[in-house]
Image (cartoon, rainbow, N blue to C red):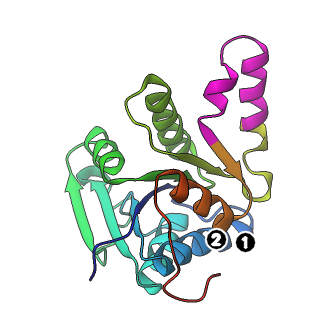
Amino acid sequence: MNKPAFSVCVYCGSRNGALPAYADVAQKVGTWIGQHSGQLVYGGGNNGLMGLVAQATADAGGRVVGIIPKALQTQENTRTACTELHVVDTMHERKRMMAERADVFLALPGGIGTFEEFFEVWTWRQLGYHDKPIGLLNTQGYYDGLLQFASHSVAQGFLNDWQMDLIRSGTEPKTLLQELVQAAGFAPAPKLAAL
């Protein structure tokens, strides 16, 4: 398999969520990555949105890099069909490796783990530890409350507008992915028909 054009680190739920739109968007994200010769970097699980985005990426011809801690192999149902599967000792190792292998970060709907990973890479960017684009896919308004709270934090003097400008949010997966990948310096051209 050829070297990937770019790597997208996707954070998302290990559950499908309440709305069919969440599964649909995970599949669209994976399909877009694969169709544009990209590589998915993710948590290595086969459950929920994690499994869907990985399968869609593979089905569209993309590389899938899974990184999972030993302690979560059973709980998250390790996807052994990854192009590369890394089993690590700790969550810290997992997150470090995911960040190192990524050109951009994208958070889909998810739970507390997704929130934590998203906030960590946002924090790292505002501290200057990396300069990689970060996206928040706000499917069906899932992240409306989070974005409103962040704006409230700006109004209350705990965040600045420049910190808010470090993230991009959107509702259309292909539009947001295109923006993030271009912001990282890549010009993805579809190898198949676009979504």
Viewed as shown, does residue 178 lie left or right of 170?
left
Dot 1 crowding, Cα within 10 Å, few <14, some 14–19, many 20+? few
Q: Tell me where residue 112 sits by quadrant.
A: top right
Viewed as shown, does residue 165 lie left or right of 101?
right
Residue at the bottom extreme, as displayed = 193
Label 1: which secondary element? helix
Q: Tell me where residue 167 sits by quadrant.
A: top right
- Which residue corresponds to the image point at 52% horizontal and 41% vertical from the top-left? 118
Residue at the top extreme, as displayed = 157
Is most of the magenta stretch helix, strand or loop? Answer: helix
> Between 63 and 94, which is closer to the camera in this rendering?
63
Q: Is residue 8 visible?
A: yes
- Which residue corresponds to the image point at 67% horizontal and 74% vertical from the top-left? 24
Mark number for residue 84? none
Note whether 172 is above or below 9 in the view shown. below
Note whether 90 is above or below 65 in the view shown. above
Note whether 96 is above or below 72 in the view shown. above
Viewed as shown, does residue 143 lie left or right of 62?
right
Residue to which mark 2 is pinned: 23
Viewed as shown, does residue 12 lie left or right of 175?
left
Considering the image in quadrants, where does the C terminus appear? bottom right
- Which residue corresponds to the image point at 72% horizontal and 64% vertical from the top-left? 172
> Between 84 and 112, which is closer to the camera in this rendering?
84
Position of residue 113 measured from the top left corner of the image (x, y, whole percent): 49, 44
Position of residue 3 measured from the top left corner of the image (x, y, whole percent): 28, 73
Mark number for residue 20? 1
Q: Is residue 12 visible?
A: no
Position of residue 39 measured from the top left corner of the image (x, y, whole percent): 39, 68
Label 2: which secondary element? helix
Start-end of magenta stretch = 147-167
Which three-letter amino acid code belongs to the residue tagged 1?
A: Pro
